[in-house]
Amino acid sequence: MIGSGLRKFAEENGFRVEKGVAFGLYRGKYMVTLREGVGWKSVCFAVALQDDGAKYALHSLINDAEFKTKHRVVGCDLTSGTVRIVFHDTFGTMKRLREATDAVYEQLCSSEVKGADHCSHCMRPLDSMDAKTVLIGDDVLPIHRACFEELSAQAEENAEKAKQTGSILTGALGATLGALIGAIPWAIAYYFGIFVGWLGFLIGIAAKKGYEICKGRETRAKGIVMIVVLLLVVVFVEYATIICTSAIYILNDPSFAGTGLTFGDVFTAVNYTLATDSAALLSCLGDVLLGWLFAGLGVLSTLRDVFKRAKSAQSAPVEMD
C-alpha cells in the first residue's frame, strides 16, 4: 500500500503507482521506488554502482550519525544495483524523507554513479529499444531484455528447486520439537503466573531452527507451518501447565495424604472440570488467547523474515512497461 504522503510525493515527481509501489524517474536521472509498511517508509534508487569510492561515499553519508538522526533513517542497504534507505515513519517523516532523497541524489550525481541509462543487473549501458522497466522483489529497476529473461528463468528454476528440496513433513516435525523446547521458559514463567511476552520469541526462533535442521522445504509453507505449530504449542503448553500445576498442588496437599490419588486421577478430574465447568473453560481459553497474542508478537519479525526470504527467492520479475 502507498499512503497519502508517498502518493503525493509520487505525483509531484510524475511517478506511477502500481502493484503496491510508486516508481519513476527522479529528476530524469535515477529510477526510484517508494514503499511503506507499518512504521516505516523506504526510498530505493536503481543504480549501476561499480566504483568502490562512490559506494564508500554513499555509505558514509547515509550512515553518518547526524544524518540518520536528522532524517530518521533506521536502515540502509547498498548493492551494485540499488541504494535503499529506510525511514522511521512518524509525524513529519515525509519532510525528512524528501530532504534525505535529495541529499542522496546529489551524492550519486557528484560521484557520477550511473542511473536509468544503465542496467541495474549487468551494469552495462541501456539502449532504449532494449530496455525494460521491471519489478524485481520490491524494487523497480531498468534492465536489458536479455537480463529480464535470465532473471525470469532463474526465478522459475529457484521455485522448482524449492518445491523439490526438503520435506514439509520432516520440517513440521522439526518445527514442533523446536517449538516445544523453546516453550520451556514460557511454561516455567507461566507456571509461576508470569506473562513474559518476549519469551514467545524463543518459540519462534526454536521452531524455525527445528524446521531447518530437519530439512524442511524452503517455501512459503515454512511460514505456514510455523504459524500452525505456534498455535498448537501454545494450546499444549497451557493445557500441560494446568495439569501439572493441579497435580503438584493436589498430590502435595497434606489434606489429600493417604487418599491414594494418582496423577491419572488428577488428569481425569481436570479434564472433567474443563468439560463441565464453563467458567474454568473460559478462563483456560482466555489464557490461550493471551498466549497466542504474546507469542504472536514475539515471533512476528521471524515470520516476516521467513515469508520475505521465500518471496525473494521464488518471485519472478514483473514487467512494468
Image (cartoon, grey):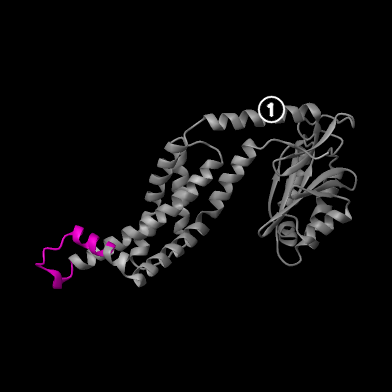
**Picture quadrant where residue 173 is located:** top left
Q: Main secondary structure of the magenta part?
A: helix
Q: Amino acid at mark 1?
A: Ala
In the picture shown, does residue 52 fall above or below 42? above
Residue 182: where, in percent of width, then height? 40, 51
Q: Which residue is mark 1?
A: 153
Q: Nearer the viewer, residue 43 or 285?
A: 285
In the picture shown, does residue 301 fall above or below 213? below
User: Which quadrant is home to the C terminus?
Assistant: top right
Q: How many marks?
A: 1
Position of residue 192 in the picture relative to residue 143 (left or right): left
Write the residue at 88% across / 43% down: 29
Write the residue at 88% across / 52% down: 13
- Is 261 a magenta residue? yes
Which stretch did the figure color magenta? 252-271
- Farthest residue toward the front? 276
Residue 230: where, in percent of width, then height? 45, 52
**Picture quadrant where residue 254 is located:** bottom left
Q: Residues within 10 Å of mark 1 (few under 14, many from 20)?
A: some
User: Which quadrant is home to the N terminus?
Assistant: bottom right
In the picture shown, does residue 139 fall above or below 146? below
Name the secondary structure under disc 1: helix
Whether residue 187 is visible to the viewer of this picture, yes or no, is: yes
Q: Nearer the viewer, residue 278 or 213?
A: 278
Write the residue at 88% across / 56% down: 12
Residue 312: where, in percent of width, then height? 64, 40
- Is 32 a magenta residue? no
